[in-house]
Image (spheres, helix red, strand yellow):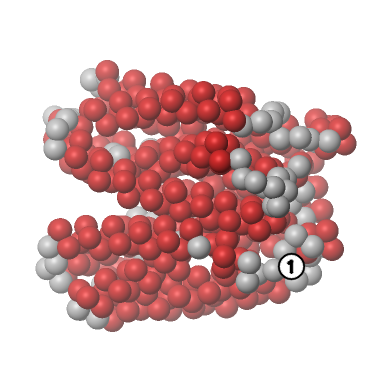
C-alpha cells in the first residue's frame, strides 16, 4: 500500500532509497576517467584498449539480461532480501578487483557489478511505487532520477582524482555501499501485499505472467514507453560520446571546455529530473514525453548547425535538460499503468531498455557519421527527435484508452 500523500515524509526511509540510487551511477562513472590508466597498466596484452574499455561497459549487457529476471523475482518473492543481496554483491564482489592483478579477473568482477546494478535499478523504483502514491510518488521518482544524475557527475570528478593517484583505489569506493546495509535493514519495510496478490504471484508462471500483463495492462502503452526509453538513452549518450569528438576534433575546443560542457549536461539532467514532480502535477505523462523530445530536438539541431562553442553549450544544456525527464516519467508511468503484482516485471523493462540504449549508443550513429559527418548527424538526430515527439503523441492517445482503474491514477 502506498504512503498517504498527506502524511509526513519518513525522511530516513527516503534518504535510504535515494542513497541506494547512487550505486548505479558510481558503477561506470568512477571507471571512465581511469580507462587510459588501466589500458597503460595492461598494455602488454593484446587488445588492451578494448579490454580496458570493457571494464566500464561490461556491466551494461549484464544489466539488460538480468533486469527482467530481477523483475520476476521481485513479484514472486520478498523485495527487501533481494535488495540486501544486491548491496552485498556490489560492495564485496566489485571491490575485490582492488586485490586482483589479472585484467580478465577484474572483468569477471564487472559481471557481479552488472547483476547488482540491475537489481538495484529495478528494485528501488519498485519500492518507491510500493511506498508512495499520487503526487508524492511522482515527486520522489523525480528526486531519485535527479540524485542518480548528480551522483554520476560526482563519480566522474572523483574518478578523475583517483586516476591521478592510482586507478586501483577506485574499486575500494564500491565497498562503501556496505554502509547502506544498516539503514536498509532499519528503515525499509517489506511492502504490504494482500493475500490475493500473494497467491496470484505464487501461482503465475513466467509465460503466464507475460500473457496477463499483456491482457490486463495497456500493452501498446508499455511497448511505447520502452521504445521511448531506448531512444532517449541512446540519444542522451550521444552527448557523452559524439559531442566530445565533435568539439575537440572538428572545432578544436579544449578538453577543459569540453569537460565543462559535459558537466553542464549532467547538471541540466539533474535539474530536469528534480522538477519532475512539479511538472507532472500540471501535465500528463504523455505530454511530458512529447515536450521532452521536442525540447531535446532544439538542443541537438543547435549543436549540429553552429560552430560557436557558446551556442553549442546552450544546445547541450537544452538537449540534456529535455532528456532528463525521460527516466522519471517512464518509471512513474509504468508504475501507474501496471497492477502491483506485476510491477517489478514491468519496471524491469525500463531498466533493461535504458541499458540497451547505452549499449548500442556507440554503434547506432556510426553509419550516419561515416556518411555525413558528426555535425550533420547531430542535426539529423534532432530531426528524428521531432518524429519521436510525434510518435509520443500517439502513445499519449493510447493512454487515453486505459481502463478506468489505470486512468484514475493518471488524471493530472
Q: Quadrant of residue 412?
A: bottom right
The correct choice, above or below, for 200 with respect to 219 in the image is above
- Mark 1 neighbour class, 10 Å CA radius: few under 14, some 14 to 19, many 20 or more: few
Judged from the image, the secondary structure of the residue bearing numbered disc 1 is loop
Taking the image as shown, residue 100 lies to the left or right of residue 397, namely left
The correct choice, above or below, for 59 with respect to 253 in the image is above
Please name the residue that numbered disc 1 is placed on.
411
User: What's the residue at 63%, 29% (across, down)?
Assistant: 80
Q: Residue furthest bottom?
A: 305
Taking the image as shown, residue 20 lies to the left or right of residue 205, namely left
User: What's the residue at 44%, 24% (across, down)?
Assistant: 178
Whether residue 216 is visible, yes or no, is yes
Q: Residue furthest front?
A: 8
The picture places residue 155, in percent across and down from the top left corner, at: 31, 43
Q: Toward the viewer: 378 or 196?
A: 196
User: What's the residue at 40%, 78% (across, down)?
Assistant: 298
Q: Quadrant of residue 366?
A: bottom left
User: What's the residue at 69%, 31% (across, down)?
Assistant: 190
Q: Toward the viewer: 318 or 147?
A: 147
Q: Toward the viewer: 9 or 37?
A: 9
The correct choice, above or below, for 81 with respect to 376 in the image is above
Q: Toward the viewer: 253 or 183?
A: 183
The picture places residue 377, in percent across and down from the top left corner, at: 33, 73
Amino acid at each position: 500500500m502506498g504512503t498517504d500523500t498527506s502524511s509526513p515524509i519518513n525522511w530516513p526511509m527516503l534518504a535510504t532509497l535515494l542513497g541506494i540510487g547512487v550505486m548505479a551511477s558510481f558503477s561506470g562513472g568512477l571507471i571512465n576517467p581511469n580507462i587510459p590508466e588501466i589500458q597503460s597498466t595492461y598494455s602488454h596484452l593484446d587488445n588492451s584498449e578494448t579490454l580496458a574499455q570493457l571494464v566500464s561497459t561490461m556491466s551494461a549487457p549484464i544489466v539488460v539480461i538480468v533486469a527482467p529476471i530481477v523483475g520476476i523475482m521481485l513479484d514472486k518473492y520478498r523485495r527487501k532480501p533481494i535488495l540486501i543481496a544486491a548491496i552485498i554483491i556490489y560492495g564485496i564482489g566489485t571491490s575485490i578487483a582492488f586485490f586482483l592483478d589479472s585484467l580478465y579477473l577484474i572483468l569477471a568482477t564487472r559481471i557481479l557489478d552488472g547483476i547488482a546494478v540491475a537489481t538495484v535499478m529495478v528494485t528501488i523504483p519498485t519500492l518507491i511505487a510500493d511506498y508512495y502514491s499520487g503526487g508524492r510518488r511522482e515527486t520522489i521518482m523525480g528526486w531519485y532520477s535527479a540524485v542518480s544524475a548528480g551522483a554520476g557527475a560526482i563519480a566522474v570528478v572523483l574518478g578523475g582524482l583517483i586516476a591521478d593517484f592510482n586507478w586501483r583505489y577506485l574499486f575500494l569506493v564500491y565497498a562503501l555501499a556496505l554502509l547502506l546495509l544498516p539503514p536498509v535493514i532499519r528503515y525499509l519495510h517489506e511492502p504490504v501485499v494482500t493475500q490475493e496478490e500473494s497467491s496470484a504471484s505464487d501461482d503465475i508462471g513466467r509465460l503466464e505472467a507475460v500473457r496477463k500483463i499483456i491482457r490486463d495492462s495497456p500493452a501498446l502503452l508499455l511497448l511505447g514507453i520502452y521504445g521511448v526509453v531506448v531512444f532517449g538513452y541512446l540519444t542522451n549518450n550521444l552527448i557523452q560520446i559524439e559531442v566530445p569528438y565533435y568539439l575537440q576534433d572538428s572545432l578544436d575546443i579544449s578538453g577543459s571546455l569540453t569537460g565543462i560542457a559535459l558537466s553542464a549536461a549532467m547538471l541540466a539532467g539533474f535539474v530536469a529530473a528534480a522538477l519532475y514532480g512539479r511538472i507532472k502535477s500540471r501535465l500528463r505523462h504523455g505530454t511530458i514525453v512529447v515536450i521532452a523530445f521536442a525540447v531535446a530536438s532544439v538542443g541537438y539541431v543547435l549543436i549540429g548547425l553552429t560552430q560557436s562553442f557558446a551556442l553549442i553549450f546552450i544546445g547541450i544544456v537544452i538537449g540534456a535538460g529535455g532528456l532528463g525527464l525521460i527516466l522519471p516519467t517512464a518509471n512513474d508511468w509504468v508504475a501507474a499503468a501496471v497492477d502491483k503484482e506485476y510491477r517489478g516485471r514491468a519496471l524491469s523493462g525500463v531498466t533493461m531498455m535504458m541499458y540497451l540504449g547505452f549499449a548500442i549508443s556507440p554503434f547506432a550513429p556510426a553509419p550516419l557519421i561515416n556518411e555525413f559527418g558528426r555535425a550533420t548527424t547531430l542535426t539529423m538526430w534532432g530531426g528524428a527527435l521531432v518524429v519521436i515527439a510525434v510518435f509520443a503523441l500517439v502513445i499519449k492517445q493510447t493512454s487515453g484508452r486505459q481502463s478506468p482503474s489505470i486512468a484514475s491514477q493518471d488524471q493530472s
